[in-house]
Image (cartoon, rainbow, N blue to C red):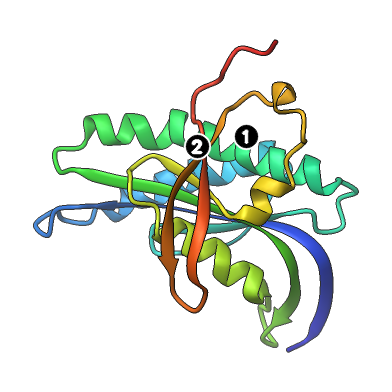
Amino acid sequence: ITATWQYPHVVVMFATFRSTSDEAAVDYLAVDETIQRLEKIATQHGILKVKTIGATIMCVAGIDDGSTREQAVIGVIDAAREMCREVYAPMAAESEAPLHYAVGVHCGPCFGALLGGNGCIFDIFGDTVNTASRMMSTAKESGTIQLSPTAKAALPADAARLRFAVEALPPVAVKGKGVMDVFAASVNARALV
């Protein structure tokens, strides 16, 4: 480890897609193109893409960018909504094999580190990262942007200010956490009042 930093409050997002067919061949060029499109959306929303793991990306907001917790979580959810609408949904509609895609969001502390000597990379670690990953992996319905209770609590109390709706989902069993309440942010915009 070359250097480490502690971040008291960040918003971590995992986004992924996969074929639900065992017979679907992996088109690596299509995966690469999809990841590049997701990275572009994240960047446009001021979110740092930390790494890619297969067809999954891990992103973080709120690292030394001057945003409030509320701004960071809204920015991440807005980016996730755009990813679902502009990348994942059209891909699923064109796919011959059924496609499952989901996003997980969680807020909290983590630490970052530069790893390696030559060509070192930045990565983030901690329970916040693990919980965001679990929010993604436990999303049952394709197209779900699944929020932890902490991510939902970071949203403004005045829900009328949001461009999306948030609804409670049935609780899910989360590895290492037990049963957790979870919430979904709507992909499509709702009318502001």
**Which SS class for mark 2?**
helix
Residue 64 position (above or below residue 73): below
Residue drawn at (16%, 56%), measured in percent from left and top?
25
Q: Residue at x 48, y 49 (%)?
A: 103
Q: Determine the secondary structure under disc 1.
A: helix
Is 23 rendered above or below residue 155? below
Crowd around label 1: few <14 · some 14–19 · many ≥20 (10 Å): many
Which residue type does callout 2 highlight? Answer: Met
Q: Which amino acid, mark 1?
A: Asp
Residue 113 at what x, y percent from top left? 74, 78
Q: Nearer the viewer, residue 119 or 17?
A: 17
In the image, 131: left or right of 17? right
The residue to which callout 2 is attached is: 83
Where residue 170 sits: x, y (%)?
41, 49
How many marks on residues? 2
Q: Quadrant of residue 129?
A: bottom right
Up-down: is 191 above or below 176?
above
Give the x, y percent position of residue 14.
52, 56
Quadrant of the rendered image containing residue 6: bottom right
**Residue 78 marker:** 1
Q: Residues within 10 Å of mark 2 (few under 14, many from 20)?
A: many
- Give the residue furthest to the right: 66
Q: CA distance from mark 1 to mark 2?
A: 9 Å
